Image (cartoon, rainbow, N blue to C red):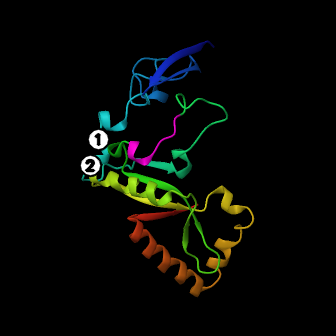
Amino acid sequence: MGILRAHVRIHSITCDFELADDISSDDFCETTKGAPGTGCQSNCEKISDFDKFGLSTTNPGRNIVGYYSNWSAHRSCNGVPNTVLPAVRPRELDANSFTHIVYSFASVSRGDFRLVETQSDDKELIAELQALKKINPNLKTMWAVGGWAFNDPPTQDIFSLMARTSSSRATFINNVINQLASYGFDGIDIV
């Protein structure tokens, strides 16, 4: 078995990777064996550049869902230069590449079970995300609630407390409905 070496340029980022050369062409939707990157899974073009799924007014049979993490606007990655892994704000996303974008994460407050912003600039970032709907009116946005850190103290029991009684569930549901509407979200992703 040999190795296929590839040199790929994605936006302004250049990547090198290696794949075993015995990979079936069907694995990459390719017509030429061992040539990933020239067909439907190249990942070198934005989805909107070739199929406009985000603009579709009918259900094409699939959704293109992206997650935007609120720390992406400020990220740095263990000394990796910003030119290699830049911070990205919601306004920089291609709204036509998605049918849905999930904004993560919100927390849930103890006792009154309200959604709580987790970054100091969440309101600003959420407003930028919602503005993408002006570019793609069919775009749906959702707010992810919880996340891996929500399973750690001091929040690890909040979902259990909220789900414990019909009254606490009703409180959470009513709060979520009102808060999603006030922020412009179309749904929620509880993780």
In x, y percent, where is residue 47? 36, 37
Q: Amino acid at mark 1?
A: Lys
130 left or right of 102 in image: left
Q: In front: 1, or 135?
A: 135
In x, y percent, where is residue 134? 27, 53
In x, y percent, where is residue 104? 53, 56
Quadrant of the rendering where the C terminus is positioned: bottom right
- Tell me which residue sits at (45%, 54%) in the image: 125
* Residue that protrudes farthest toward the bottom in the picture: 167
- Tell me which residue sits at (39%, 50%) in the image: 63
What residue is disc 2 on? 56
What residue is disc 1 on? 52
Say above or below: 38 vs 177: above
Does 42 appear in magenta?
no
- Tell me which residue sits at (44%, 23%) in the image: 37
Quarter of image, res 76: top right
Prevalent SS, magenta region: loop
167 left or right of 57 in image: right
**Element marked by disc 2:** loop
Say above or below: 83 vs 77: above
**Label 2 crowding class (10 Å Cα cut-off): few <14, some 14-19, many 20+?**
some
Q: In front: 36, or 137?
A: 137
Q: How many numbered marks, from 0 up? A: 2
Q: Are marks 1 and 2 in contact (CB under 8 Å)?
A: yes
Q: Amino acid at mark 2?
A: Ser
Task: Give the Cα distance between marks 1 and 2.
Answer: 7 Å
Magenta range is 86-93
- Tell me which residue sits at (46%, 28%) in the image: 28
Q: Which mark is residue 19?
A: none
* Residue that protrudes farthest toward the top in the picture: 2
Say above or below: 41 vs 133: above
